[in-house]
Image (cartoon, helix red, strand yellow):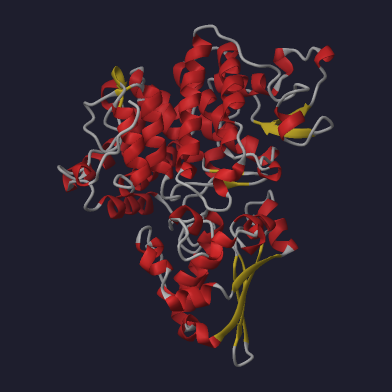
Amino acid sequence: MPITHHLRVHRSEENLEQTDQLAWRLAELATDPVEVEDDVVDMIVNRVIDNAAVAAASLLRAPVVAARAQALTHPYTPGATVFGRNPGQRVSPEWAAWANGVAVRELDFHDTFLAADYSHPGDNIPPILAVAQHRACSGKDLLRGIATGYEIQVDLVKAISLHKHKIDHVAHLGPSAAAGIGTLLGLSTPVIFTAIGQALHTTTATRQSRKGRISTWKAYAPAFAGKVAVEAVDRAMRGQSSPEPIYEGEDGVIAWLLDGPEASYDVVLPAPGEPKRAILETYTKEHSAEYQSQALIDLARRLHRTRPELTDPDRIESIVIHTSHHTHYVIGSGANDPQKYDPSATRETLDHSIPYIVAVALQDGAWHHERSYAPERAQRPDTVKLWRKITTAEDPEWTRRYHSTDPAEKAFGGRIEITTTDGRTITEEIAMADAHPLGARPFARAQYVEKFRTLAQGVLEPAEIERFLDVAQRLPELGPEELGGLTITARQGLLGTVRTPAGLF
């Protein structure tokens, strides 16, 4: 049976023992030598493929180009690989985690988990993989590390809301990635405890990175957390200590950044000897957009086919999307961000605007990671006219389902009410995205492979596509000498088609 760790703030004079701190309990979880179960192994392979797919599609995007350029100024032996470059070109692992983390995150197109807070657990993979390559670990070691990273991030996201206090969600990623690296390397509980504390302390930041005019830092934030996690593990291995109790201290994270001195949380963790299965509760994306938009994109595509007249803004009086609190206030009109209705908004802003996303998906009957965000698409007059007729509203029932612990009830969709200019009302709803495990077309290995092939087309040579898929699907049996093959090399000349910006290094 799972165990529940009761978490509260402690005054300094209470002298909370290390072994009673949440960071210690997470470190104990990381050192539990339980085997990774077969279905978890299969899902980790899926997510390694998924990460590489979205990284391939982002290799020429400016944030990825800049991050890659930074990493390549830090060559290191043995080091780790950088997406896009030849696997023989190695950089220091923290910089590989940085460059690859940006590539994975840039298009907002990989996996997600939503509960009390929200997250992209696949962000754990770049730092853990980078260290695995640097330290010549095996595929089995890597699987154990990734299973820990997913488990800890999901368990924290279920229990502790960061968003409520406008703290960016990567504050759960720093500790989970540090713990995953600890599992990978077989480090001791005290060392992992220290690394978790440092990683948390250095990754707490406000969520302005996801508010208003959203900048390119949105892709960098999780990569920064991964880089910090690698550095925190390095310091901990060298015997350096961390602030403690980092969660429970009277000047700690809970007391001053979250619910305050009187706060308490129940964090549910696997008991010793129980398998780490949290990755199976997470879900990936069929569309390159914020997760709460996935189901609504599917519904808008369906309406495009069944009600083509609704694509004409002159026939629409209003469209109201009734949905959860989180969707309304983060990517809906409840955010009160005028930028969400701005045709000149950044791509990062548009992928956090459900009114824009629904307008385009309704008119096009499709969603594309590049074309749907192109400036000429966002500025099309009929789209702008329709877009500005779309608002969101919180519905308590959708909020309840968003937070449900029952997988059959947990949902991130909504109900669309369309009022036409001739007085008709059309109502449609959707609970699960089509690609969700309980959706109309659940993603399985074949869909992950197809997503990789589609996004890698024109970016990688056909032989490189097949080589990567072969290596990734043999992950459980990979030896240290093959782990460097868990990367992708762009087709010859491709990376040279974009300008590499100059910087400090």
Give the residue drawn at x 79%, y 25%: 9
Observer-nearest residue: 297 or 145? 297
Residue 91 visible in image: yes
When asked about the image quadrant of residue 377, the answer is bottom left
- The image shows residue 14 at horizontal and vertical percentages of 83, 14
**395 lies left or right of 306:** right
**475 lies left or right of 342:** left
Image height check: is 481 above or below 462?
Answer: above
- The image shows residue 302 at horizontal and vertical percentages of 48, 74
Which residue occupies the extreme left position in the image? 492
Which residue occupies the extreme bottom position in the image? 422
Observer-nearest residue: 47 or 303? 303
- The image shows residue 159 at horizontal and vertical percentages of 70, 38
**109 lies left or right of 83:** right
Residue 273 visible in image: no
Image height check: is 17 above or below 487?
Answer: above
Give the residue drawn at x 72%, y 65%: 395
Give the residue drawn at x 47%, y 66%: 343
Give the residue drawn at x 48%, y 32%: 224
The C terminus, quarter of image: top left
Image height check: is 196 above or below 486?
Answer: above
- The image shows residue 427 at horizontal and vertical percentages of 62, 79
Q: How many marks?
A: 0
When asked about the image quadrant of residue 480, the answer is top left
The N terminus, quarter of image: top right
Which residue occupies the extreme top position in the image? 239
Observer-nearest residue: 104 or 402? 104
